Amino acid sequence: MAEETQLLTATASARSYKPEVEVDGKWYDNGYRYCTEAEALDSAQNLYGRWLLTTGCRATPSDDAPLDEWVDGGNRKLDAPEGTPVYHAATSVQL
């Protein structure tokens, strides 16, 4: 299956957007919900770049309330106290 990145057309009822990656022909999300489609796609592309078995990534509309924001290449909860650092996932594993 060809590697792909998708931006899906949002519906008028979408409250948020979720990042998804494709593994073995199935799409999976990680529970993050963003206010914008661009944030969700950036997050999905970040995850895609760190996982070894992914064959695609996309941002999809969600009926869930937005909970997260994508800031400087990392995730932060919308309700985090002022000054809370951005979470950056590890880009490599040390064994």
Image (spheres, rainbow, N blue to C red):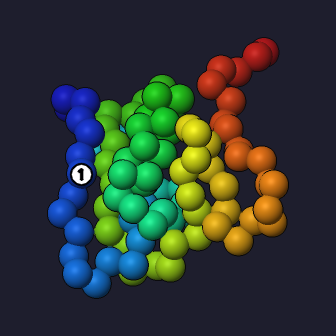
Q: Residue furthest top?
A: 95
Q: Is residue 67 left or right of residue 6?
A: right
Q: Quadrant of the N terminus?
A: top left
Q: Quadrant of residue 55?
A: top left
In this view, the residue in front, 67 or 6, is: 67
Q: Residue at x 45, y 67 (%)?
A: 35
User: Visible in this render: residue 7?
Assistant: yes
The residue that appears at 70% across and 71% down in the rendered structure is: 79
Q: Relative to 12, does residue 92 appear above or below in the rendering?
A: above
Q: Which residue is disc 1 drawn over? A: 7
Disc 1 marks which amino acid?
A: Leu
Q: Name the residue rendered at 44%, 52% in the picture.
A: 39
Horizontally, residue 91 falls left or right of residue 3, namely right
Q: Quadrant of the C terminus?
A: top right
Q: Tell me where residue 72 appears, x and y as whole percent.
A: 58, 39
Residue at left 23%, top 81%?
12
User: Which is more toward the observer, 15 or 71?
Assistant: 71
Residues 1 and 16: in front is 16
Near mark 1 (Cα within 10 A), the count class, few <14, some 14-19 or many ≥20, is: some
